[in-house]
Image: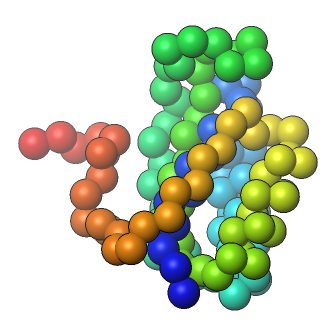
Amino acid sequence: MNFYEHTLIAKQNLSQKDVDAIEKKYEDLINKNSGKVLKIEKWGLLNFKRKIKNYTKGYFLHFKIEGEQSTLEEIKSRTKLDGNIVRFLTVKYKNLDLKTEYFSKNKN
């Protein structure tokens, strides 16, 4: 099994209920396809430096997962078809840092 970080950017005009539904949808998708969600970080509504598909902001969801290549292929194919997702990025790692949260609300 490999470790991945999968970041989704959802449209800015979605309600919080819709964003939670997207989170649940992808968490279930990963778990059903021989993967395991290790951590989910909700980074919230952040500004873009440049417009992406005429949007200036987006809801960021960051998944830290463990899975196989088939899991990753299923996630990518479903993400490409999802109309609420503006962009996504998947990065493969040898080890994941589950302690550090870069966009946490409680900064020390």
Left or right position of 2 against 24: left
The answer to whether residue 81 of the structure is visible from this angle is: yes
Location of residue 33 (image quadrant)? bottom right
Which residue does the image show at 68% across and 76% down from the upper left? 69
Query: Can you give x and y, in whole percent of width and height, for residue 41 in the image?
Result: 45, 55
User: Residue 53's spot in the image, x, y percent?
Assistant: 76, 18
Which quadrant would residue 12 be assigned to in this image? top right
Question: Which quarter of the rendered picture does the N terminus lie within?
Answer: bottom right
Count the marks: how many?
0
**What residue lies at 84% left-to-right and 58% top-to-bottom?**
77
Q: Nearer the viewer, residue 78 or 42?
A: 78
Q: Nearer the viewer, residue 15 or 25?
A: 25
Of all residues, the one furthest to the left in this rendering is 108
For the C terminus, the quadrant is top left
**Residue 85: percent from left, percent from top:** 75, 40
Q: Residue at x 77, y 67 (%)?
A: 73
Asked if residue 82 is positioned above or below residue 78 in the image, the reply reads above
Confirm whether residue 28 shows in the render: no
User: Which of the two residues, 101 or 91, is positioned nearer the viewer here?
Assistant: 91
Percent from the top left, x then y, of residue 50?
A: 57, 12
